[in-house]
Image (cartoon, rainbow, N blue to C red):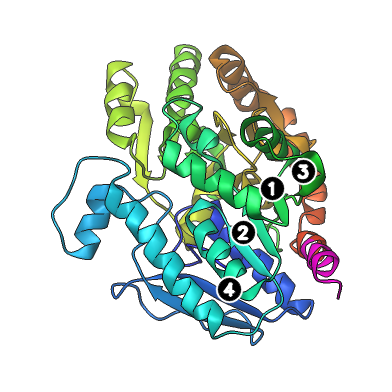
Amino acid sequence: MYGWEFPPYSSGGLGTACYGLTRSLSRKGAAITFVLPYYPGTSDFLDIVSANITFKRVNSPLSPYLSSARYRLLRGGAAAPAIYGESLFDEVYRYAEEAKRIAAETEFDIIHCHDWMTFMAGIFSRHIKRKPLVVHIHSTEFDRTGGNGVNQHIYDIERRGMEEADRVIAVSNYTKGMIMRHYGIPEWKISVVHNAVEPKSPSLPSPFQRKKIVLFLGRITLQKGPDYFLYAAKKVLEHDPDVLFLIAGKGDMEHFIIEKSAELGISRNVLFTGFLKGEELEKAYRMASLYVMPSVSEPFGITALEAIQSGTPILISRQSGVSEVIAHALKADFWDVNDLANKILAVLRYRALPAVMREHASQEITKFNWDSPAQKCMDIYRELTGR
């Protein structure tokens, strides 16, 4: 299995998904060799999951959201201004070459790749071992860019990976449609395997819940819609000036969003926390009156499930995979800031609404554990290997 992030060193839902999926696969008897980027600044933490999972490290600073400047810094070179520089793509192929070497020395039955930066590794490994290839689509270049400024090199890698794969796994029907529409992959080749969350005990009520706090949590990038969150916040504050809007995360739009909050005259009501994890992340969910996910294009959206687990009502973009599987959530088109604002105000004003949402969603969330997606993957493995 090839991936590029794994908790606790992860910056998005991909790492969370890989963790949950591999744990459940191992419980079902799969012996997994997980190959991921590793550079000397990363501590040794990867023997924590299961005796059935072996980790292999490639000395590489690969990251799905790594800029060329950050890449050069990690490699010890000068910074460059481009978002995707040639050096980063060189690293993708270097990772693939190292992965091919690991594949040549390892016995396995199937290759499972998570998103574009690992696809060449999977293709190279497939060519030398002649084993079935599964590519798992957690996000496409069309999701990350909103369809504007699609990077042709990334698109070409994504398309080649899907074309060469024996099976393509999409994390939602929403993503399946994107794959068929933009990459020309036939429907018969695509299996939908929705994401899930790790089970945990119900959260106790937060002492902060008497405050009006609306939470945005995710990368501060075009894909996640932080600008629409601010535009909706502006409209909410025109009716209720006591609401606090919490933005938790980091990303390439961070400075723009900080400046935009000042430009809109709402900076006193907007708090930026940076990237949160662990107890800080849990506290952010619990203290929020409402979690808002206004994504422009969200293949799934595990954070929505995490919020429900923490007892927090959710308002999610209809342009998301999670919206097709969660019934007890408020939903809006990401671009309709009036609808977003009205639904935020409804949750803050009418106590019965969040109470009902919380009660029903807490029952609904129990079906979203990783055993189901893991079983679907095992069924795909057996179909492709004949075992």
Q: Residue at x 22, y 49 (%)?
A: 69
Type of secondary structure dominating the magenta stretch: helix
* Residue type, mark 3 in image: Ala
Across and down, in percent, residue 371 comes to 79, 65
Across and down, in percent, residue 240 comes to 49, 18
* Residue type, mark 1 in image: Val
Calculate the distance from the C-alpha at mark 2 to the C-alpha at mark 1: 10 Å
Across and down, in percent, residue 143 comes to 54, 35
- Quadrant of the image occupied by residue 246: top left
**Callout 3–callout 2 Cβ contact below 8 Å:** no
Calculate the distance from the C-alpha at mark 3 to the C-alpha at mark 2: 21 Å
In the picture of the structure, the residue carrying the numbered disc 1 is 171
* Secondary structure at numbered mark 3: helix
Q: Is residue 306 visible?
A: no
Q: Which numbered disc, 1 or 4, marks the residue that appears first in the sequence?
A: 4
Q: Which numbered disc, 4 or 2, marks the residue that appears first in the sequence?
A: 2
In the picture of the structure, the residue carrying the numbered disc 3 is 361
